[in-house]
Image (cartoon, rainbow, N blue to C red):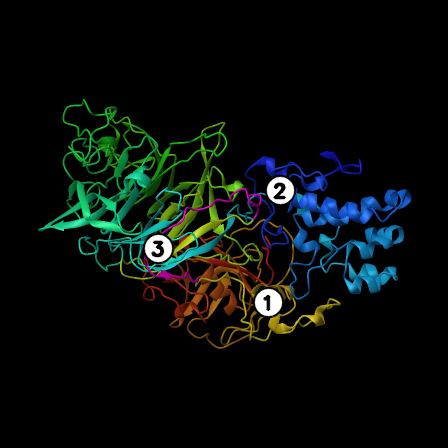
Amino acid sequence: MWYFCDILGRVRHSPFIGLYLLGFWIAPVSLHPQCLDFKPPFKPQEDLQFCAMYRNFGCCDSAKDQELMAKFYKIMDNFDNYGHANCAGYVQDLLCQECSPYAAHLFDAEDPSTPIRTLPGLCPDYCSQFWLKCRSTITLLSDDLQLAQAEPDQVHFCQHLELEDPDYCYPHLLSNEQLTQNLGHVLADPEGCLQLCLEEVANGLRNPLAMVHANDGTHRFFIAEQVGLVWTYLPDRSKLEKPFLNITKAVLTSPWEGDERGFLGLTFHPNYKYNGKLYVYYSVEIGFDERIRVSEFRVSSGDMNEVDHASERIILEVDEPASNHNGGMVMFADDGYLYIFTGDGGMAGDPFGKYGNAQNKSALLGKVLRINVDDNDRGPLYRIPSDNPFVHERGARPEVYAYGVRNMWRCSVDRGDPLTKEGKGRIFCGDVGQNKFEEIDIIEKGRNYGWRAKEGFSCYDKKLCANSSLDDVLPIYAYPHKMGKSVTGGYVYRGCEYPNLNGMYIFGDFMSGRMMNLQENKNTGQWNYHEICMGIGLTCAFPGLINNYYQYIISFAEDEAGELYFMSTGVPSATSPTGVVYKLVDPSRRAPPRQCHYDPLPVRVKSKLIKFRPKETLSGVELPTKHQKLSPPEEPVRPHPTESAVKESDKNWLQELMDILKEQGAAVVTTTLPQTTTKPPRHTRRKNRRKKGKHRSESGLAPAAAPQSGAVRLAGDEQGRDDRGRVEIFVNGEWGTVCDDLWNTKNAAVVCRQLGFRFALKASKHSEFGEGKSLRILLDDVQCEGTEESLLDCQHTDIGIHNCAHYEDAGVICGNSDYVDA
């Protein structure tokens, strides 16, 4: 147990101290710590002198702590020594609950149908003692007239300070292990899937495949579209109407879904602030030949938000024998050199030459290239770094830095730990596999990454694989195609705003939409895997946050401050304006106020500004409009004494959300399947282990006629629970299963709402509830907006047409509360 002395000299213990020290930890999803500003708690930068019990994790920094201390002394100046001895401890306790990680609960800020309390919610026994000993402090602590009126009557006063959820009353919440255990760590669902949230940053983009910053202090970010346009965004997320770069006439691409050609990469010179140089990687057509081109541009001398298009100088061109596997990453590493990542030339199995392009060091395809583009205004456009590994090898191209890569899609440089700089300079890449495995590699000088001899950890070309001279380096992680079929490399998080994410390598898969992370075990050197899911229930119920994204994850990005983003789209076509940029958010812990503050340098804008308007919404929770009348609960809810003072029209979106969540378990949505009767869901907090099982018996359903097309049912939960199971859909006279290739919470929300539930708690994959082998797979690649009446109203492949097996049967967990009954 941790102990400390408060300002009065009392020796006390704190259940919150030390929890944040343990680093990454999986916490129960039911926790929802929140400060009075509707943001997560934090670890103060400086020790708190007054509210010391929250010095390691809470909602106060040293400035707030000093403010509360001043208020304490102002109150206590009204008392003699006897009053000070009896009441100082109570006054300090009550004032300091603004610093509690659960301040929003204690002050009823999570119930915006009432004003925020002026005193925290108190447990009855504590309240009685406070009233008996120190009722004279009440009017000094609070200017609430209702409290003042209730003060003469102990029962009335303590009833006024009760909370509807007694788990959160002070001081009992301090000893509630469910609330204090692992507080401040990244949340996870019962399967260990990390719960993060998102913030929409940009939308309406056509296959956004790169987002970069210029590292010039302006904190602008530049988003590139596959068609050959680059847009400038200011720190407030407004977009300049005029593009930064427009080479659409030169870029080779098409509207075909999945076309890998186009504008593929963008990076700024490390000294861009002074030399104005940037480098792009794109596909071109010269006569009948297709090529990849790396060019240098300069920014316009008359407009810092526009490239001088006449300044293009072609640094490198390489013939592409096929239209796929074009690589596309271009970036500068810590050594100041330009790194270029090429694909193996396309087709399947790298069939070019005796050993393929990737193993042929005399070819530029299937390689990591490293060149020096400094001081190139006169003489050659690039030079070869003297320490490139194959400079003196006969027949090898001197540009080659590493080889044996198939089609590396998105690489990044680790900024290193903010304090120790551990890991700084490492280059991480995702290398897209052939037909079995996707892999993550750390790029090192002169190393062979195995393709086409190996794919992931397994042999692809058995003859090459058996060659003793292969000397390849294995990936740090590889995953099979049942998890995803096209890796999108990401970044090691080194930002300031979310300390829990430090050191996590976060990446995704383009086809499955799966978000993943790896974290290195410092003792073993192994990389531990966790899937990333979007927060369920109340986890992301903060203003401006969402919990869903389009499934085709195209790319990841860092802003100038080191915060992490990714780009995805609903239609993987270079001409479809369904691309969105999202910022990753950890709802469990934030950095202290002002720690991450920066002042961007001014930007001279000559173009019209387009204000950013978010379009995405929170999924799995019904958010009514201001004009929608909320259904009353079936059971009466005790109104707060001041509830009548708040008008319905004054509620904001979060107020209405909380009104709905307040009705959990009371009113069940009455939407049901055509000709189908469903039993009301059960609500239990039992923590049983979920098991896979056979098809659940339908004998509990009322006799009915054949269902209509689009009807759904849940099957496969061994315990027979109504709120979860494998999704089975009735189409054209038969029941069948749904493939999980693009399965997400929006799809699950359609199913759960159709079955009469308020929440989609989880979109389960990989036949979590068993394989429906006795049924045909009827739907694949389902993509819903979340508002459709049935899955048939969503985008999907033709009925019965699929590219999956029953081990990919989709499922759901539904509910009328914001936690999972395991």
CB-based contact (under 8 Å), mark 1 and mark 2:
no
Q: Which residue is farthest left? A: 287
Residue at 78 percent of width and 45 percent of height: 73
194 left or right, relative to 118: left
Q: Give the numbered dot on residue 656.
A: 1
> Circle 2 is placed at which residue position?
182
Q: In terms of secondary structure, where does tag 2 sit?
A: loop
For the magenta stretch, what is the residue range?
Answer: 588-614
> Circle 3 is placed at which residue position?
605
Residue at 65 percent of width and 44 percent of height: 63
Closer to viewer: mark 2 or mark 3: 3
Q: Position of residue 565 (x, y in %)?
A: 42, 49
Q: Which of the two residues, 449 or 66, is positioned nearer the viewer here?
A: 66
742 left or right, relative to 651: left
Closer to viewer: mark 3 or mark 1: 3
Which amino acid is tagged 3?
Val
Badge 2 or badge 3: first in the primary sequence: 2
Which amino acid is tagged 1?
Glu
